[in-house]
Amino acid sequence: MVRLVRPAGADRGAGLGAGEEAGEEVEEGGERWTCALVNNMPDTAFVDTEEQFLGLLDGASGHQTITVRLHTLEKVPRGEKAAARIAAGYLSLAQLRGDPPDALVVTGSNPLETRIEDEPYWADLVDLLSWGRDHVSTMLLSCLSAHAALVAFDGLERRRLKAKCTGVFGQVAETAHPLVAGLVPPIVLPHSRLNTVEADDLRGAGYDVALHSDAVGWSVATKMVDRARVVVMQGHPEYGRASLLREYQRDARRYVRHERDEVPRLPIDCVGPEDQAGLADLHQRVTGGERDPALVEAFGFDQAGARAPWPWRTMAVGLYKNWLAGIPKRSD
């Protein structure tokens, strides 16, 4: 179970959506792991991302206690609402460094620049990852943060895709890899990204690929980097059943409102069979010339999202459970 630590003096009535209040006693037997979750997603996905990762950590830890502290990079642009949530529930990176956890989880972020090195938070992100490889047992890095580590640690540059990679894709598991022990096929994972690092380059740098897709490349890989066992993920096991559909809704809204001219990409297998034809028709109309906001607003995204299948959830919990099981006890 997750025990969520909040800043001293935080409003105990300000809910964060998961975990317990700061200062509560850990049940007898104490915590099994400590974890820092650094949430760098933009405001539109900030709360969802927080809840997704906390939910997956909660499911994977089972009856054992994992104490989680929330952090974020200061140079990620924030609006008033997200800033207030951070003030109420997030700790500083200085506090992270002053009390190193067993595990460090760093989310992706919205890519604003063609070169990852030009992102406003690049220097701070590299500093955090460099600190982590010397001070924690393991780092789990998602999407953009994974690509950042591959640049910083291995000099592997990401490549811009011709079109956004988005959808649910079948996976091939390297059965000897400890991260996939006990996972039952068929295995699928969501992907949602604009960039990639080639699998051959990844393996050439010494990474062991645990999961890969014939359609979209590697999803999960690992390597020892100094003290830390680094897990890099291009896939998104933390996603909820409606995550891809909500991303499409956001992109379609921006397109029909002329807030952006990039044509939205329809995610593969993001809804159930009963909603596939309707969603495909909406997409064809929006991208075929009917750039009308009323079309998007009229579609039942909430209902379709609630009906969407979640075939990767059990596998995702198992993947995280295997990851946590590889962290040595602090008394060892």
Image (cartoon, rainbow, N blue to C red):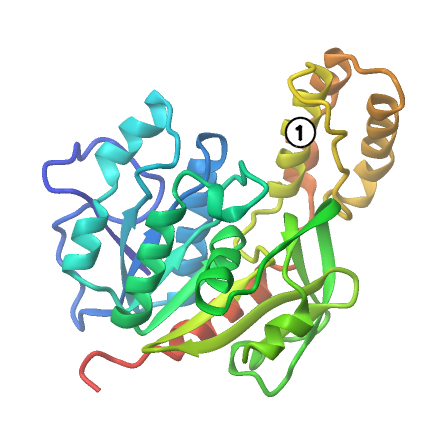
Q: Position of residue 255 (x, y in %)?
A: 71, 22
Count of numbered tags: 1
Q: Position of residue 96 (x, y in %)?
A: 21, 55
Instruction: Identify residue type, mark 1.
Output: Asp
The quadrant of the picture occupied by the N terminus is bottom left
**Identity of the residue drawn at 63% across and 38% down:** 306
- Please say whether residue 310 is visible from this viewpoint: no
Say left or right for 84 vs 200. Answer: left
- Please say whether residue 190 is visible from this viewpoint: yes
Q: Position of residue 198 (x, y in %)?
A: 67, 65
Please tell me which residue lies in front, 316 or 87: 87
Q: Quadrant of residue 259?
A: top right
Classify 14 as above or below 95.
above
**Identity of the residue drawn at 70% across and 34% down:** 304
Please tell me which residue lies in front, 12 or 137: 137
Say left or right for 278 vs 200. Answer: right
Q: Quadrant of residue 324?
A: bottom left
**Identity of the residue drawn at 82% across and 44% down:** 273
Crowding near pointer 1: few (<14 within 10 Å), some, many (20+)? some
Q: Quadrant of residue 32?
A: bottom left
Say left or right for 51 vs 27. Answer: right
The quadrant of the picture occupied by the C terminus is bottom left
Please tell me which residue lies in front, 20 or 192: 192
* Residue where numbered disc 1 is placed: 251
Q: Where is residue 69 in the image (x, y as percent from the top left)?
A: 26, 52
SS at badge 1: helix
